Image (tube, rainbow, N blue to C red):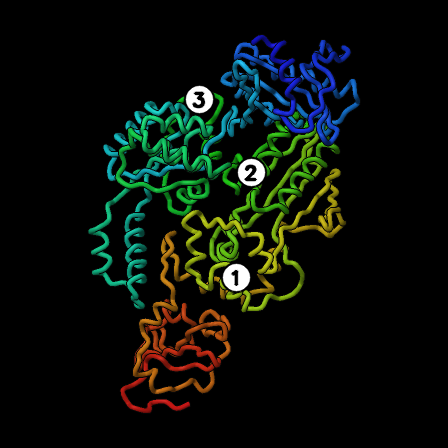
């Protein structure tokens, strides 16, 4: 059917596109004035009174012109009718979408106008029209590294070389052309640290309370391969349809992917499809496999000491000669915002495309921090108005590590690198003229109670510190970060510094407006919080520190381990502690919120202490007569001795 008859048929059945659409004109002519004839296939109004521009195409050949024409028609309608963007909608209708889908997806991404794609079919001989909504591609163009990575480990350089070759072969067979392979080598001593940490974890899981023995360490070393070579694999993010095409050669996996495709959407869908596609035959040759992500890439370098030996670039990444390895590594680590934690970018405020991309990347970098996301966007808009010819150098670091933020800041030598912050430096005529910066602030001057630590564990982690430490498996990322920090008495604040020569004027954002304040010292407000809440910081550090072994976190619930030390004979004696101390002598946490505490000797010392469950496990010499007595808090609030009594029938009285 030719386009004109198809248009007339669609006009007669316009409700198949959308209920309550009212056709105003077909082949509507909009007067010239912006260099276009502007004949709109169908002009309509919807139920809310908005202009609806319907552009009809019936073949791939003609559909390639549709997007260019839509741009012209939208501008013509805005000029002719004096309409705003929110008063205009566009609907692109076509019988074929193979050639149209990519430019349509780009148009949806770039425009602020409401856009809908519709595939139509006409039945014969009754000429009834059926419709199907077209979903734009998740990725339409440009460089978008996937935030889901692969880590393949190898026992030797020969095995590493075979791994690289197998990645190339696997990707070629699947039609995955654009990807990065970062080759890394382990630091000296990393293997030994991994063996020790794994041995400690197994020791704890099996209920051990003392130090791990040399025999256990040796046994673990005999079971663990030395994996000193790594390929860190990062592909270009694909559309869902592309991933399905890669999987299509395996009928069983393809059917599974099609089934869950209908029940998922967004990032969840793309992540699952990529996992299926990369795992399809031919598979990659590797000795060990881990899941990777931007935060983990950062951890591999400074924390675990891996060294980058080579960056292998394939496809578009190899052809793009102006793209440096430094930029690639930064984007793998999430500097483009895809990590949900980091963003680094310098733009000209007058460049609309750069500005729009930066705003989009800000949202990507701060998915769980709406406070800073709104502030940064507003500040960039403000800077563009005040300095239209200026530049903005933006750096965001929002690790979203919740409670671990305080632990890292209090224990790491480069503490400042763990503090959430952002900086937007505005330059105009080659001079610094304004700076925006964000940091953590105390909600007020109130000192936080020591019980806050246990309250947070109870509220978010079922009172189990090990559940919190599980977040370290994915870089410590905690989606509830903003809520946890607020419960700790911290908020994400924002400041501004205006520069005029040597003069500096400082402001703080309060209730959506700038209020003048005294000179701001970077991270000074957060430092005041830490100083004021020394006891809470001490509790956090003492609770978490024993579980860290060279960048690897060992688990094992302390309460469960102490339950192994409960002695039925001791319980039967019914002896209660006569005067339970208020706090743990080691970490100072209030004992009233604990299930167990011990009165025992410290490891490698003659000193004794009253210890909470964690300190009993990690700092105590054990439970037993002459070593330590274990007490359990009963429902009535009293503390019953449940372990460590002597064989004497009545060795302690209430």
Quarter containing the N terminus: top right
Judged from this view, the residue extending furthest toward the front is 126
Q: Which mark is residue 459?
A: 1
Residue drawn at (46%, 64%) of the image: 463
Relative depth, front residue between 127 and 130:
127
Q: Nearer the viewer, mark 3 or mark 1?
A: 1
Q: Which mark is residue 587?
A: none
Q: Secondary structure at mark 3?
A: helix
Q: Is residue 614 above or below residue 505?
A: below
Q: Is residue 357 left or right of residue 543?
A: right
Q: Earlier in the sequence, mark 2 or mark 3?
A: 3
Percent x, y of residue 348: 65, 28
Q: Quadrant of residue 226?
A: top left
The residues tagged by marks 2 and 3 sit, at their Cα atoms, a distance apart of: 23 Å
Label 1 Cα crowd, 10 Å radius (few <14 / some 14-19 / many 20+): few
Q: Secondary structure at mark 1?
A: helix
The residues tagged by marks 2 and 1 sit, at their Cα atoms, a distance apart of: 28 Å
- Which residue does the numbered mark 2 point to in the structure image? 364
Q: Nearer the viewer, mark 2 or mark 3?
A: 2
The residues tagged by marks 3 and 1 sit, at their Cα atoms, a distance apart of: 47 Å
Q: Is residue 612 above or below residue 32?
A: below
Quarter containing the C terminus: bottom left
Percent x, y of residue 103: 56, 19
- Which residue does the numbered mark 3 point to in the structure image? 316
């Amino acid at each position: 059917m030719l386009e004109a008859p198809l248009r007339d048929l669609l006009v007669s059945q316009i409700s198949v596109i959308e209920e309550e659409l009212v056709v105003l004109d077909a082949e509507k002519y909009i007067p010239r004035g912006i260099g276009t004839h502007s004949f709109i296939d169908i002009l309509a109004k919807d139920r809310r009174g908005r202009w609806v521009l319907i552009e009809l195409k019936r073949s791939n050949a003609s559909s390639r012109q549709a997007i260019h024409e839509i741009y012209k028609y939208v501008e013509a309608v805005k000029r002719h009718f004096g309409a705003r963007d929110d008063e205009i909608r566009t609907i692109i209708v076509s019988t074929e979408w193979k050639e149209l889908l990519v430019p349509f997806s780009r148009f949806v991404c770039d425009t602020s106008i409401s856009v809908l794609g519709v595939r139509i079919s006409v039945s014969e001989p009754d000429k009834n029209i059926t419709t199907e909504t077209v979903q734009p591609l998740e990725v339409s163009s440009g460089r978008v590294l996937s935030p889901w990575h692969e880590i393949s480990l190898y026992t030797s350089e020969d095995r590493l070389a075979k791994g690289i070759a197998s990645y190339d072969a696997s990707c070629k067979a699947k039609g995955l052309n654009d990807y990065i392979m970062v080759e890394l080598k382990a630091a000296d001593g990393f293997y030994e640290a991994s063996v020790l940490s794994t041995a400690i974890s197994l020791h704890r899981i099996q209920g051990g309370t003392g130090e791990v023995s040399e025999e256990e360490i040796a046994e673990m070393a005999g079971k663990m391969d030395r994996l000193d070579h790594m390929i860190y694999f990062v592909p270009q993010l694909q559309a869902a349809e592309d991933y399905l095409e890669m999987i299509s050669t395996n009928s069983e996996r393809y059917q599974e992917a099609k089934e869950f495709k209908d029940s998922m959407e967004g990032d969840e869908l793309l992540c699952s499809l990529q996992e299926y596609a990369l795992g399809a035959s031919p598979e990659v040759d590797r000795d060990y496999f881990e899941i990777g992500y931007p935060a983990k890439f950062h951890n591999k370098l400074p924390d675990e000491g891996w060294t980058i030996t080579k960056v292998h670039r394939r496809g578009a990444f190899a052809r793009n000669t102006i793209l440096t390895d430094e930029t690639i590594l930064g984007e793998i680590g999430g500097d483009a915002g895809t990590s949900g934690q980091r963003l680094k970018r310098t733009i000209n405020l007058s460049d609309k495309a750069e500005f729009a991309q930066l705003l989009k990347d800000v949202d990507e970098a701060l998915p769980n921090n709406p406070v800073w996301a709104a502030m940064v966007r507003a500040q960039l808009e403000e800077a563009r108005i005040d300095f239209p010819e200026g530049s903005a150098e933006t750096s965001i670091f929002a690790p979203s590590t919740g409670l671990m933020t305080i632990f890292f800041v209090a224990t790491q030598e480069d503490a400042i690198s763990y503090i959430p912050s952002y900086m937007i430096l505005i330059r105009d005529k080659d001079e610094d003229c304004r700076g925006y910066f964000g940091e953590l602030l105390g909600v007020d001057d109130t000192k936080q109670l020591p019980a806050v630590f246990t309250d947070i564990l109870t509220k978010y982690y079922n009172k189990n510190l090990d559940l919190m430490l599980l977040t370290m498996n994915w870089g410590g990322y905690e989606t509830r970060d903003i809520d946890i920090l607020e419960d700790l008495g911290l908020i994400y604040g924002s400041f501004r510094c205006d520069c005029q020569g040597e003069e500096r004027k400082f402001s703080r954002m309060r209730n959506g407006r700038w209020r003048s304040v005294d000179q701001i010292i970077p991270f000074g407000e957060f430092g005041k919080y830490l100083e004021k809440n020394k006891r809470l910081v001490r509790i956090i550090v003492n609770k978490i520190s024993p579980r860290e072994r060279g960048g690897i976190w060992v688990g094992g619930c302390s309460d469960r381990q102490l339950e192994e030390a409960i002695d039925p004979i001791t319980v039967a004696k019914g002896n209660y502690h006569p005067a339970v101390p208020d706090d743990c002598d080691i970490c100072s946490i209030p004992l009233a919120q604990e299930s167990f505490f011990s009165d025992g000797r410290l490891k490698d010392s003659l000193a004794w202490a009253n210890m909470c469950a964690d300190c009993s496990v990690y700092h105590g010499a054990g439970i037993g007569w002459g070593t330590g007595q274990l007490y359990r808090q009963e429902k009535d609030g009293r503390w019953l001795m449940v372990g460590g009594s002597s064989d004497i029938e009545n060795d302690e009285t209430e």
